[in-house]
Amino acid sequence: MTVLRSVLYMPSSNERALEKAKTIAADAIIFDLEDAVAPDAKEAARDNAVAAVGSGEYGGKTLTIRCNGLDTPWGTADLEAAAKAGPAAVVVPKVSGAEHLAQVTAITGDTPVWAMVETPQALFNIREIAGFPQVSVLVMGTNDLVKELRAAMLPGRAPLLPHLATALLGAREAGKAILDGVWNDVKDLDGFLAECRQGKDLGFDGKTLIHPTQVEGANDTWAPTEDEVAHARKVVEAFEEAARDGRGVVTVDGRMVENLHRDIALRTLETAEAIAALA
């Protein structure tokens, strides 16, 4: 299992930031060549990202590169360089559908793709995007989605909830991971943590982040608690005991549990073990 609780965007034009990222406890890094990089710094940022991916200096972090779109002067060269660098994935902005992804993968080959869901077109085509063979993760681009929808970004994200749910449905149908969008106000920790809890409750696998101070909160939110791990073990052990005794009904802490609860418990334990392996 690849743990993606905290996925931090890092501007690849900022060499100091790239150096600092080596010590940040994020599960994954997105070396950004797109929004966070000025036009005159695009080529240097590309070189920096390629070097970072190949450096071997980021521990067990999942390393990806967000490329510029194919409709920009840098997109094709970004994809070519990223694929050669061998990241865990290339992150593709504003994916519109399978035809767009076919254009991307004609350049990147078998390199996994993280597809950003940022437009109404992406939401209408979510099943073909999530089901595309090279796509391994969906990434919500909530800022662009708000702009495209002319919606308001409100506490609780009521205007976005139907669209977040649509993307989640597409991801789960295809068996793919999906990441929540960013929280913009780095000084509002309470608001950030509330949105993390909402994202976890909705079913997201983790959250994209714009600042290192957000990493700890995301990691804590998406990590099973000690009580959750202990309960999961009890559920699994109860099912194993029932199987040995030939019983079809299982009770844990006075409540009847079913196979679906066992599946949830197994995933909790798998997640806890994967997080422990990162330490």
Image (spheres, rainbow, N blue to C red):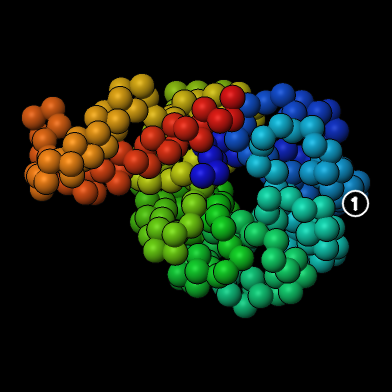
Q: What element carries label 1?
A: helix
Q: Which is more toward the observer, 125 or 134? A: 134
The residue shown at (82%, 53%) is 85
In the visual, does 19 lie left or right of 148? right
At horizontal 37% and vertical 51% (from top left) the residue drawn is 161
Please say whether residue 166 is visible from this viewpoint: no
109, above or below 261, in the image: below
Q: In which quarter of the image is residue 90?
A: bottom right
| Residue 136, quarter of picture | bottom right
User: Looking at the image, which residue is at 34% across and 41% down?
Assistant: 266
Badge 1 amino acid = Glu
**Considering only vertical position in the picture, is 75 above or below 19?**
below
The answer to whether residue 193 is seen in the rendering is yes
Q: Where is residue 100 in the image (x, y as percent from the top left)?
A: 64, 73
| Quarter-of-image position of residue 239 | top left
Q: Name the residue under label 1.
A: 43
| x, y percent for residue 248 | 10, 48
Residue lying at the far bottom of the rendered structure = 99
Q: What is the quadrant of the C terminus in the image?
A: top right
Compare residues 58 and 8 and report the one nearer the observer: 58
Relative side of 268 to 13, left or right: left
Residue 198 location (% of width, % of height): 37, 38
- Residue at image coords 76%, 26%: 20
Q: In this view, does 271 lie above or below 263?
A: above
